[in-house]
Image (spheres, helix red, strand yellow):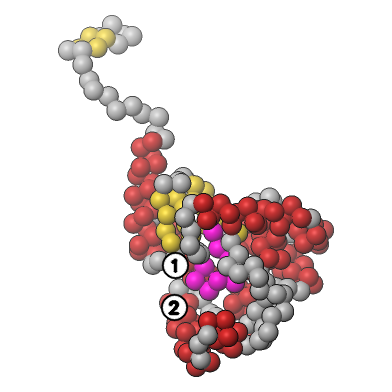
């Protein structure tokens, strides 16, 4: 069964959603039959690589949302608590705000090499925990190496327009499916989970979707039994 996950590596709830999803999978007995594909979604493509207040996420969000600085701090403190509950450590005080396109391009080339999961995890951790600058090509090269990419791979991701087109195509597909934000999980193209729901709630949806998928892909027919004869000349009524 296939699960597609749209996310932005600079979305705090996407990393939390990833951890909650992983928690659900640990309790899912048929997880070896699950195929996961990560997809790109830019929450705000208009953000410059070095926006105003890039070194102060509290001020950046306050200005974007038209709220007070203290309100922004309070919002982020709440997210820190949510992250901690999911087993994550967020350091908003050292976060560097930037456009996520370069990171998304890196994820796209990683996916072509079967490293999509590695890329998502490494970039999330780099941004939210380490405070890495995801607009810096040298930093992205270092992170790409951690993911399993070569320097040439990273350069290709950042310069070949095909990878930007892949990012944009993923985002357009999410909107067609009804996504209004991320994280957005689509299961077997029949069920969706919007937002960073708890592992318990995710598990319930997984179980429902998997039971349906298994029935549809078992290869067995629903049989209404009548009188039959078998190749061994046994006949029953």
Q: From the viewer's perspective, tell me whether residue 236 is left or right of residue 94.
A: left
**Mark 2 neighbour class, 10 Å CA radius: few under 14, some 14 to 19, many 20 or more:** some
Q: CA distance from mark 2 to mark 1?
A: 10 Å
Comes first in the chain, label 2 or label 1: 2
Residue 9's place in the image compared with 84, above or below, is: above
Residue 212 image-quadrant placement: top left
Q: Which residue is mark 2?
A: 82
The answer to whether residue 93 is above or below residue 146 is below
Q: Position of residue 39 (x, y in %)?
A: 58, 56
Element at badge 2? Answer: helix
209 in magenta? no
* Residue that badge 1 annotates: 196
Mark yes or no: residue 207 visible.
yes
Out of 40 and 63, give the one closest to the viewer.
63
Question: Who's the residue at 76% across and 74% down the image?
Answer: 136
Position in image of residue 143 (x %, y %): 71, 68
The furthest residue to the bottom:
70
User: In screen coordinates, is 93 left or right of 143?
Assistant: left
Residue farthest to the left?
Answer: 237
Q: Nearer the viewer, residue 38 or 181?
A: 181
- Mark 1 Cα-neighbour bin, 10 Å: few <14, some 14–19, many ≥20: many
Q: Which residue is pictured at 22% across the width and 20% down the height?
A: 225
Residue at point 45%, 73% (across, down): 86
Q: Residue furthest front?
A: 66
Q: Is residue 20 visible?
A: no
**SS class of the residue under badge 1?**
loop
Tell me, yes or no, whether the two marked residues, 2 and 1, touch with CB atoms within 8 Å.
yes
Q: Where 28 falls versus 221 (above or below)?
A: below
Magenta residue span: 6-14
> Which of the 4 image quadrants contains residue 120?
bottom right
Which picture quadrant has residue 51? bottom right
Whole-percent x, y for residue 237 in the image: 17, 12
């Amino acid at each position: 069964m296939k699960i597609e996950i749209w996310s932005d590596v600079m979305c705090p709830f996407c990393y939390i959603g990833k951890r909650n999803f992983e928690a659900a999978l640990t309790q899912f007995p048929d997880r070896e039959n699950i195929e996961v594909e990560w997809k790109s979604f830019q929450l705000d493509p208009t953000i410059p690589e070095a926006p105003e207040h890039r070194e102060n996420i509290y001020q950046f969000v306050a200005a974007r949302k038209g709220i007070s600085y203290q309100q922004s701090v309070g919002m982020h403190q709440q997210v820190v608590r949510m992250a901690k509950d999911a087993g994550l450590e967020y350091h908003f005080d050292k976060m560097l705000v930037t456009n996520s396109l370069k990171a998304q391009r890196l994820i796209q080339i990683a996916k072509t090499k079967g490293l999509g999961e590695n890329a998502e995890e490494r970039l999330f951790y780099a941004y939210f925990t380490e405070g890495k600058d995801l607009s810096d090509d040298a930093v992205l090269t270092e992170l790409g190496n951690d993911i399993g990419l070569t320097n040439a791979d990273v350069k290709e991701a950042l310069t070949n327009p095909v990878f930007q087109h892949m990012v944009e195509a993923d985002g357009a597909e999410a909107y067609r499916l009804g996504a209004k934000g991320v994280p957005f999980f689509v299961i077997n193209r029949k069920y969706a989970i919007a937002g960073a729901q708890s592992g318990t709630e995710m598990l319930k949806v997984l179980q429902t979707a998997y039971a349906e998928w298994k029935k549809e892909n078992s290869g067995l027919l629903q049989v209404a039994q009548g009188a039959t004869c078998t190749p061994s000349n046994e006949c029953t009524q």
